[in-house]
Image: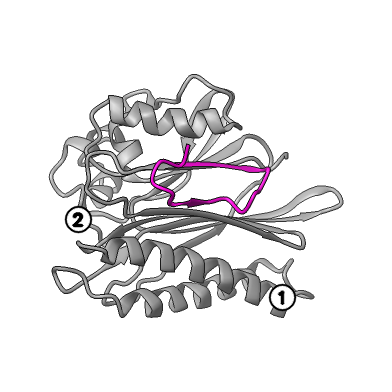
Amino acid sequence: MSGSGRVDLAEANWAFGASVTGKRERDEDYVACDEFGSVRIGVLCDGMGGGQSGELASEIAARVFITGVRRVAEELANNWSDDEARHEAYAEVIGHCHESVGGISGEGGISGTTLTAVVATFDEGGTSSLDLIHIGDSRCYRVLDGRAHLLTDDHSVTGDMFRAEYIQLHEIEETSGKNTLTKNIGDEESSKADVSTIDPEGGAFLICCDGVWGPLHGVSGLSLADSDICSQDMAAGMVEKAIERGSSDNCSVLIIDLCA
């Protein structure tokens, strides 16, 4: 179930995605995957800017990111196992994303997008490295033993409030400032993304936009659909559940199964 057609999984058997317009006029989210050599990439972008600019920003950022990671992985083929080298390469790619999105003008004179991505590298023993690249307020969760564990920080006014311990995580959805981002692709500062290398062992990874986590992240954490996590039914079920819970935004989910 891709809904609006804003999902390009490149026939990957390790990824599942869904995106629906919901109550908005346009679907400004974009979900994409790619695989080359020993590298797998999954990325979700949630665009903003009004008119068609949000659609363009999210798709361009996702495609520039994938193309950029492919290029730097080839350039650093003999040094790709070095965490610092990869992190520097991602910073360069994010810079290109800023440049590409910065030229798009929205109805308010600005445009931009979130970007949350997982880049996994494999060798004969399994996953050798797992990198998380993130800017904005889309989220990445690790789903393990039926529970979703948040791995990213919201780059938003309410995200800052949560980290300052003024509010709890489940209160973000009902707090003023939730939709005010402090960093995104295309912002004036060309802000740096959060880049980290995380333990690849265990669970699957669920990336979703705020239209999904907003209505579904409650006191007990993220409410999951009643399906096998590593399935298209789970991706479709998550967006359907968000709509049922009253989401007024686009709803998009990307699930990455590193064991496939």
* Mark 2 or mark 1: whose residue is earlier in sequence: 1
Give the percent coordinates (x, y) of residue 69: 60, 70
Q: Quarter of the image for the C terminus: give it.
A: top right
Residue 183 can be seen, yes or no: no
Q: Residues within 10 Å of mark 2 (few under 14, many from 20)?
A: some
Q: Is residue 197 left or right of residue 96?
A: right
Residue 152: x percent and y percent?
A: 43, 49
**Quadrant of the image occupied by residue 134:** bottom left
Q: Residues within 10 Å of mark 1 (few under 14, many from 20)?
A: some
Looking at the image, is mark 2 or mark 1 nearer the viewer?
1
Residue 34 found in image quarter:
bottom right
At 36% across and 68% down in the image, what residue appears?
185
Q: Which residue is mark 2?
A: 180
Q: Which residues are magenta?
A: 1-18
Is there CB contact under 8 Å for labels 2 and 1? no
- From the image, tell me which residue sits under label 1: 74
